[in-house]
Image: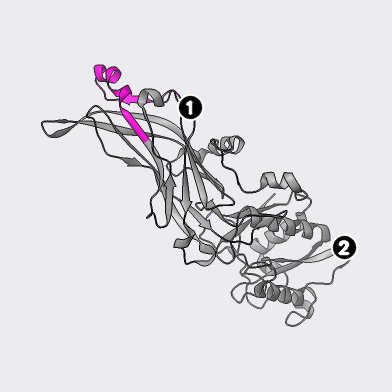
């Protein structure tokens, strides 16, 4: 990520604020290329996009002497994408049948060609909560199987989150949605089907902005472990990345020196099982307390005077970097967790801070509610 971007370039990387009739082509292609997209759960690519390429089908029955008699099944392969909106409490789900993917199973020879291709099949993406909390707009997409096999356009549905139904901070609401399908026609029937439920989180937090543009509301895909990544190979943040790696993996080898073994949270392991970090306001009471405690360790003041504090360093060329970040509830002033400080080049500390600020914005990390983790890569 380019930390020096300005204006239109940064806006291009900002959360989606215009949802078209098709999902973003480049990002969709990258998402669908992930192996996990071809699973029952799909791929939560990031906070703004979820995708899936899978197959669904329908079993058709006829009533014969008041009994349901199975006649055959039809299925198709599809691509599906959900994109969260960065300025409104909306998420759009796109669905595309893959051309030539329709398959007919178990039909007798006559019905395979004379009946099955002309039966109806419909799909709709829907929020499964009460309409008080969320509502999906646009009706089901319905075609015969013959038509589904040649159509390539994207269908889409919008899910709206009703902020007035929330009593939580920032008007947060969590919504579950799924794709539902059914078939019929010519007296044939069968049971509806649904995909696995996925979760979106919507909020009305009014403190997100970038380059003078405000993003007062949003919906994000929640089924992902939020993570900030620093790379040691990135010369702009190398010293900070090395510091965090040491703090996460070998905390007892960091300053300040504590009498009890250090436990420092926030390491990304791929799950939410380990303790993450929680964002707090930059100029709030908690971040100020974190800065004050950090300063005592950096300047060898009580309770970290002498050998317990960070050894002297050149303050003209280096900063005192801290982890966990001062903008988190797990920072230096936390009673539950230890912290680490290290002298790093001034420019690297500033670049890492800029990336952290951009990450909070781009992943829409809410104050006090979103846990996130930090990943260090070579």
Residues drawn in magenta: 97-122
Q: Which mark is residue 152?
A: 1
| 181 is higher (above) or lower (below) than 164 | above
Residue occupying image coordinates x 62% and y 48%: 15
- Would residue 100 be counted in the magenta stretch? yes
- Would residue 245 be counted in the magenta stretch? no
Q: In the image, 27: left or right of 69?
A: right
Q: How far is the residue under mark 1 from the one under mark 2?
A: 58 Å
Characterize the local packing of mark 1: few (<14), some (14-19) or many (20 or more) Cα atoms within 10 angstroms.
some
Residue occupying image coordinates x 69% and y 47%: 11
Judged from the image, the secondary structure of the residue bearing numbered disc 1 is loop
Judged from the image, the secondary structure of the residue bearing numbered disc 2 is loop
| 13 is higher (above) or lower (below) than 306 | above
Q: Which quadrant of the structure image shows residue 276?
A: bottom right
Q: Earlier in the sequence, mark 1 or mark 2?
A: 1
Residue hosting label 2: 317
Provide residue 154's location: percent of width, then percent of height: 49, 33
Q: Is residue 228 visible?
A: yes
Characterize the local packing of mark 2: few (<14), some (14-19) or many (20 or more) Cα atoms within 10 angstroms.
few
Residue occupying image coordinates x 33% and y 40%: 193
Provide residue 201's location: percent of width, then percent of height: 50, 55
Residue occupying image coordinates x 71% and y 76%: 293
The answer to whether the residue labelled 1 contacts the one labelled 2, judged by CB atoms less than 8 Å apart, is no
């Amino acid at each position: 990520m380019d930390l020096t971007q300005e204006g239109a370039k940064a806006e291009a990387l900002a959360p989606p604020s215009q949802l078209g009739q098709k999902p973003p082509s480049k990002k969709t292609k990258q998402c669908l290329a992930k192996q996990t997209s071809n699973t029952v759960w799909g791929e939560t690519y990031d906070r703004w996009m979820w995708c899936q390429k899978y197959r669904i089908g329908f079993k058709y029955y006829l009533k014969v002497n008041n009994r349901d008699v199975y006649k055959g099944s039809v299925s198709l392969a599809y691509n599906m994408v959900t994109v969260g909106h960065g300025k409104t409490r909306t998420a759009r789900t796109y669905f595309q049948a893959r051309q030539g993917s329709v398959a007919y199973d178990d039909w007798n020879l006559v019905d395979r060609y004379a009946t099955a291709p002309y039966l109806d099949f419909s799909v709709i993406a829907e929020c499964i909560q009460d309409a008080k909390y969320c509502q999906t707009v646009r009706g089901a997409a319905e075609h015969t199987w013959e038509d589904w096999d040649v159509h390539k356009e994207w269908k889409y549905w919008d899910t709206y989150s009703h902020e007035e139904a929330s009593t939580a901070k920032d008007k947060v609401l969590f919504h579950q949605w799924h794709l539902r399908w059914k078939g019929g026609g010519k007296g044939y029937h069968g049971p509806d089907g649904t995909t696995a439920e996925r979760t979106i989180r919507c909020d009305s937090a009014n403190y997100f902005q970038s380059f003078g543009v405000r993003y007062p509301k949003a919906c994000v895909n929640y089924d992902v472990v939020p993570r900030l990544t620093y790379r040691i190979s990135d010369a702009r943040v190398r010293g900070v990345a090395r510091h965090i790696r040491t703090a996460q993996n070998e905390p007892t080898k960091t300053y300040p020196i504590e009498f009890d073994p250090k436990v420092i949270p926030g390491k990304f392991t791929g799950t939410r099982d380990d303790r993450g970090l929680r964002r707090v306001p930059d100029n709030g009471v908690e971040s100020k307390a974190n800065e004050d405690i950090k300063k005592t360790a950096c300047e060898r003041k009580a309770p970290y005077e002498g050998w317990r504090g960070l050894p002297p360093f050149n303050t003209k060329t280096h900063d005192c970097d801290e982890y966990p970040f001062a903008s988190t509830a797990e920072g230096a002033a936390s009673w539950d967790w230890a912290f680490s400080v290290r002298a790093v080049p001034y420019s690297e500390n500033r670049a890492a801070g800029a990336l952290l600020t951009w990450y909070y914005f781009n992943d829409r990390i809410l104050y006090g509610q979103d846990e996130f983790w930090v990943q260090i890569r070579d």
